[in-house]
Every structure is written in structure tokens, then in C-alpha cells.
Image (cartoon, grey):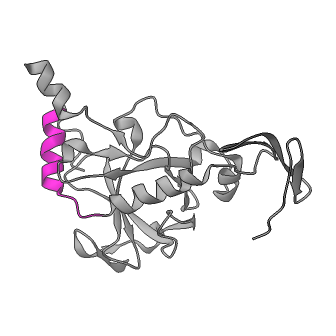
Amino acid sequence: MIKIQTKYYGEIEVPEDNEIHFIRQIFGFEEYSDFYLLEMKDLDNFFWLQSKDEGSLAFVVVNPRIFKPDYVLDIDQSDKNLLQADADEDLADLVIVNIPENPSNMTLNLLGPVVINTKKRIAVQAISNRNDYETKYRVFPEEQETKEKLG
Amino acid sequence: MLVLSRKENESIVINDNIEIKIISLRPDQVKLGIVAPRDVKVFRREIYDEIQQANIDSVKPADLTALKNVLNLKNKDPKEGTDDK
């Protein structure tokens, strides 16, 4: 076990070999390669992607199929090569969640999934080949629409 | 940066196996045709910028209690008692 600083849980102990190494880093955060995936204790299906080296850096990630059941992982062969996956079953994909001040407006980054080789514990942020996937996919319809329906 | 002048239907070759051809030229837009091996990724620059911006926007502090409330409210059929290992 090693001790790491986390954004929300303070200092915690994690099994060292749970570390996930990014072969190609999260865009805009190229200096951070090593992360831990931490379960959110009171929120099913949500995880923290917590930087090992920078306690204040953590992304909220979720299995996209929780909110978009027909989500498909469609990434380039070059990304699969980077991930050294023997089979697609070794790959797990998660998407980064953007939680604004009003969480009803939360969005998912479907275009840039985080793809992890769960056996080798290496990862990339990939770019989906799907043209219809957005970086800010709304999970819930806009409040205004709801109000109109009610009125 | 290497700068080359090309006319319509002319092309450049990169690394022996990638060809970029000028398909058509208009005053405000150029149409490119790209021939490359399957494992070469080709994306518009904006895609990278957009993903990077979304990443940056996502690390702002989040109110998890509010998120939890919203999820409970929106989820009409909350799964109960399926975890707590």
C-alpha cells in the first residue's frame, strides 16, 4: 500500500499495483501520467480518476452506458496498439463527467473516452471515431423543457 | 514549419505512405483528400482543442452532494441494496 493525497478524501492508502499508467495522457494534462481509479463510496457507478502525483487533480468518470446505453467504443487501431490489448475484452472505457454548479446540467465527454487495458493497467484518452459524439453530452434535458411539459 | 505551395489536384507525400491531395480550392476553403494506413489517425485540429477544453472544464470543484441529490431525483427507479460490499 502507498499513501496518496486525494482531492476529496484527503490522504488515503491505495494498493500500489492498482496504479494506471497513461501511455498518452489526458489532453491538457500531459504532465500527469499516473492515476488511481477510486470508487465513489456513496455514488454508484461513479469513480474518481485521481492523479497519483497531484492531489488536487482528479476527474469524475463514469461508465457512459449508465446514461447512454447504446454508447459504443469506436477508436483507432493505433490507440488499441498503444493499449497493447490482446482482446477487446481487456479494454474498459470510461468518460469524464463535467459537473457544473447546477448538476442537472452535467455533461459527459463522449468524444474523448478514457480507455484502460485492465490487465496491463495502461490507459489513453482516445478520440472516438464517431462524428455524432460530443464533448458535452447532456445527461438530463434542459430545465426549461421540463417546465414547459409541466405547464 | 515547412510551407509548400500546391495547386488543385496536386498532392504531398509524408513518410512514403501518407498522401494529402488538394481536391478543390475555393476562396475561403480548401478540400483535402487524405490517403493513409489504417493505423494513422487523422482528426481536425478543433477536435483536439474541444476535448482539451472539456477536460479542463471538468476539473473544477464539483458539489457531490448536489450531484447525488440530482441523480436520486432524476432516477425514477433507483437501484437499492445492490452494493455495500
Q: Is the stretch drawn in magenta largely helix, strand or loop?
A: helix
Q: Residue furthest right?
A: B16
Measuring 75% from the left and 51% from the top, which residue is drawn there?
A: B40
Q: Which is more toward the observer, A121 or A113?
A: A113
Q: Which is more toward the observer, B66 or B50?
A: B50
Q: Residue furthest front?
A: B27
Left or right of B62: which side holds A50?
A: right
Question: Looking at the picture, how far across and down is residue A73, in whole percent?
Answer: 55, 40
Number of numbered discs overlaid on the protein picture: 0
Residue B79 visible, this angle: no
Is residue A53 shown above or below A103?
below
Left or right of A147: which side holds B31?
A: right
Left or right of B60: which side holds A16?
A: right
Residue B27 visible, this angle: yes
Q: Quadrant of the N terminus of chain B?
A: bottom right
Q: Which is more toward the observer, B69 or A92?
A: B69
Q: Quadrant of residue B45?
A: bottom right
Q: Quadrant of residue A6?
A: bottom left
The verdict on residue A38 being magenta is no
Question: Looking at the picture, how far across and down is residue A13, in whole percent?
Answer: 31, 75
Left or right of B34: which side holds A96?
A: left
Measuring 53% from the left and 68% from the top, which residue is drawn there?
A: A21
Span of residues in magenta: B60-74
Q: Residue furthest left?
A: A151
Question: Looking at the picture, how far across and down is residue B55, in whole percent?
Answer: 41, 59
Question: Looking at the picture, how far across and down is residue A89, in whole percent?
Answer: 58, 43
Q: Which is more toward the observer, B5 or A97?
A: B5
Measuring 20% from the left and 47% from the top, which residue is drawn there?
A: A103
The verdict on residue B63 being magenta is yes
Is residue A74 shown above or below B19?
above
